[in-house]
Amino acid sequence: MSAFVIVDIKVRNPAEYSRYIELITPSVAHYNGRYLVRGGKPQTLDGDWVSERIVIMEYPSREKAQAWLTDPALVDIHNMRRENSYQCDMLLCDGVN
């Protein structure tokens, strides 16, 4: 079953975040993931959720998504995302069969 990683991020340092994007992009493909949304100009339709940037990635399984996030070779790159954002929330959820 597909799994989705959903990221809500408020970028603090756009130049460094751009560098992060260059470095992280190949790793998503390495784990058989693909980007479905990357930025997306979020618009709140209902409720109080305010977002600047949404990223949605699809992976073939939860295990692949978790392996991407916990790969020791990617620790420094994931830290770049954290260090160059005011806020970064990440969710993992299952797709629909």
Image (spheres, rainbow, N blue to C red):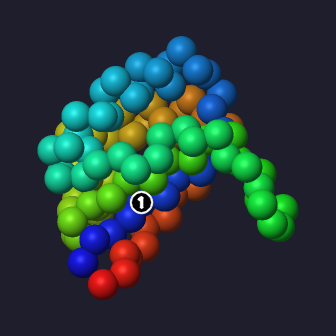
Q: Is residue 44 visible?
A: yes
| Rendered location of residue 3, percent (x, y) | 33, 69
Quarter of the picture containing the N terminus is bottom left
Is residue 23 depicted above or below 89 in this figure? above
- Foreground: 78 or 60? 60
Q: Give, as a three-letter code, the residue at label 1.
A: Val
Residue under label 1: 5
User: Which residue does the image show at 30% across and 34% down from the upper left?
Assistant: 25
Quarter of the picture containing the C terminus is bottom left
User: Which residue does the image show at 45% across and 31% down from the upper left?
Assistant: 80
| Rendered location of residue 58, percent (x, y) | 33, 59
Is residue 59 depicted above or below 10 in this figure? below
Q: Residue furthest right?
A: 48
User: Which residue does the image show at 28% across and 71% down from the upper left?
Assistant: 2
- Foreground: 52 or 69? 52
Q: Taking 9 as reference, is 63 left or right?
A: left
Judge the density around disc 1: few (<14), some (14-19), many (≥20) Cα neighbours within 10 Å.
many
User: Which residue does the image show at 63% across and 32% down from the upper left?
Assistant: 11
| Rendered location of residue 55, percent (x, y) | 49, 47
Which quadrant of the structure image shows residue 20?
top left
| Rendered location of residue 74, percent (x, y) | 27, 40
Q: Taking 4 as reference, is 1 left or right?
A: left
